[in-house]
Amino acid sequence: MTTTTSGSFSAGPPAGAKIGPIAWARKHLFSDWFNSLLTLIIVSVLGFAGFRLITWAFIQAQWLLIPNNIGLLMSGTYPSNQYWRIWTLLGVVCTLAGLSWGIIARNLSRLFSPWVLGGIAVVSAFFVVFPATRPSSMILLPMVAIVAVMAWVGRLVGRKLAIAGQLISLLWFVSYFVALWLIGGGLGLRTISTNDWGGLVLTLFTAISGIALSFPLGMILALGRRSELPVVRWLATAYIELVRGVPLVALLFMGQVMIPLFLPEGARPDRVVRAIIALSLFSAAYLAENVRAGLQAVPRGQQEAAASLGLNTPLTLTLIVLPQALKIAIPAIVGQFISLFQDTTLLAIVGLAELLGMGRSVLANPAYLGRYAEMYLFLGIIYWVFCYAMSLGSRKLEQKLNTTH
Amino acid sequence: MTQIQTEAAQIDTTGNEPVIVAKDVEKWYDNGFNVLKGVSLTVYRGEVVVVMGPSGSGKSTFIRTFNALEPYQRGSIEVDGILISHDLKNIEAIRREVGMVFQQFNLFPHLTVLQNVTLAPIWVRRWPKAKAEEVAMRLLDRVGILEQAHKYPGQLSGGQQQRVAIARSLAMQPKVMLFDEPTSALDPEMVREVLDVMRTLAKEGMTMVCVTHEVGFAREVADRVVLMDGGVLVEENTPMEFFNNPQEERTQKFLSQIL
Ligand SMILES: Nc1ncnc2c1ncn2[C@@H]1O[C@H](COP(=O)(O)OP(=O)(O)O)[C@@H](O)[C@H]1O
Ligand SMILES: [Mg+2]
């Protein structure tokens, strides 16, 4: 068999594949005196910093402000007798996540690798040990169980049902509106004004809405910029260049102040909706450029081959060009999604109490004066977890779509 | 390998009904370069025409006008009785009837071999998936790629990829096949397997226009060989005469360079 991608020429194992840790350290860390010196300096600096961080975290730090305010941080001023709605939503998300996992891994011999099992165990243990989550561990642990059980169910369904993939995508789509209903109320549930949405729930809601809106918009703009109609091309280019020249903060303020000016009294969108619109319009311009780079990377021969088979332009675009362009652009697109997620922190400036804003208002409480380090470390970890998950997902997706070996 | 085409594309080689009629075709590229300077060629049903000529002489451009991948400005081209208008209005109808094989294969890398072959029959001919797959598997078997049907193009050798590309075109049951240097991007040891497929196809009576510099193939398979140089057809002859007794000085010069 001939493959085009096998990289190594030697017949044996590549160098360094099977050497012990001591030999490895000697080769990579202590190869000469300069290298050894560098290793020693870096190790001592890192060791010192790590030691200070650990002694601070376990001796000096006063973590109490996190468990005391966990409700505010997670869901803002959302009425606590309605928390069950957010828990229900989490249950829905865990169900879908588990099902998706099972369907994606339906053909793998093992549903959970030892690494994933270990990860689940660590997360569960953390929920029990960490003071902020311990009171909720009676809910959080079942959530973990839901993911695991649903993954198992998803695998069974995925093996039986050919359309399981499409079905789960549809369910995710529907779940967005279920989330909207659960959080906001209506249709039998008590209505909860967006003024009371806050914390992580608001952050996730705006970020997911922004991603879901900006992606198709960015794709349309990218296609518009390559259109053969000059007017379309010109408009798309103008939009992209205009938006990319304006800072997001300015756009957010304009969204809050200007969108209401254009619309009659009754039809004015809610503050959260306005923020989501501004965020999406901003992000779409950058996404458009990422998608355009992907489109440009698809060789012309692909279009010619499709055309020579009799495929018309829309079919060529949707079946041949876009799938390849988007695949090429995955890292850049996910990078933009990560930016968008982090940009939700700017919503605090226009008065929306998302996660970071909530943290700051907790810090403004005299009871927790000066506890910046604890709060920002905690918030930083939360942001990191979500961003890293996206980054990990993007890499897995790339691996899954890699068809060269 | 016995028979490559599917039943619907069986062709009667005896009649001399024209499939492609190109008359005085002239083309300018956007930069003003006059690439085709009045080229005429008629290809009859069941005929194999080999186009030769130095690099840059306009061979690719010429055969790409036959399936409207390139527009042209003057003259006329009729394919199977349908006129290719200068503004490329009726292109999809023509492209369904004309298969094309490219130098760089141009397989769709994100689709499996089988999906590559079934894509157009399903989406353009509107065949049910089962029928498209059955026909595709038969074609893949006949070009010797059956075992690789569920692999991706990137996992195949160049010769295998080009054979898949031929099967992909044949799946649309075209009336005529265009080949643009199908073996030029291949390692020498893979040229044969592709030429074998083309040879079988020709023997079954497929109408073919091949740009190629494979002299052995041209001698054995071609009904006519034409030489293109500087955007005009310089000589049009039987392979025997073309290689053994060329009439034009430019043909002699060209042959002395490639033989
Ligand atoms: N898009 C284009 N714009 C301008 N000139 C082109 C373009 N494509 C090809 N040419 C020129 O047209 C000539 C003929 O090209 P081509 O048909 O590819 O020749 P051949 O296939 O015989 O090598 C070459 O000189 C090439 O540089
Ligand atoms: Mg060429």
Image: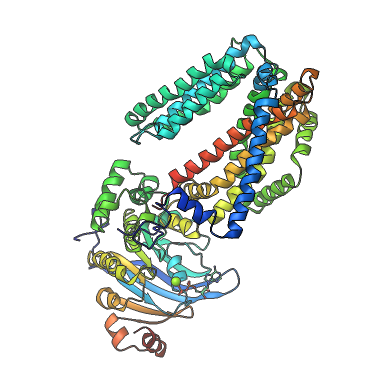
Name the residue: 59% across, 39% down.
A215
Task: Determine whether, in the image, residue B45 is placed left or right of residue A114.
Answer: left
Q: Nearer the viewer, residue A399 or A328?
A: A399
Q: As drawn, which residue projects farthest toward the left?
A: B2
Task: Determine whether, in the image, residue B109 is placed left or right of residue A74.
Answer: left
Say above or below: A349 vs B177: above
Is residue A347 visible to the viewer in this orientation of the structure? yes
Name the residue: 36% across, 55% down.
B155
**Image coords of residue B188 (percent x, y):** 32, 72
Say above or below: A321 vs A372: below
Say above or below: A229 vs A168: below
**Image coords of residue A151 (percent x, y):** 41, 27
Q: Nearer the viewer, residue B143 or B207?
A: B143
**Image coords of residue A38 (percent x, y):** 62, 54
Name the residue: 33% across, 50% down.
B151
Residue B211, quarter of the rendered image = bottom left
Is residue A379 visible to the viewer in this orientation of the structure? no
**Image coords of residue A320 (percent x, y):** 46, 50
Q: Quadrant of the N terminus of chain A?
A: bottom left
Say above or below: A135 vs A4: above
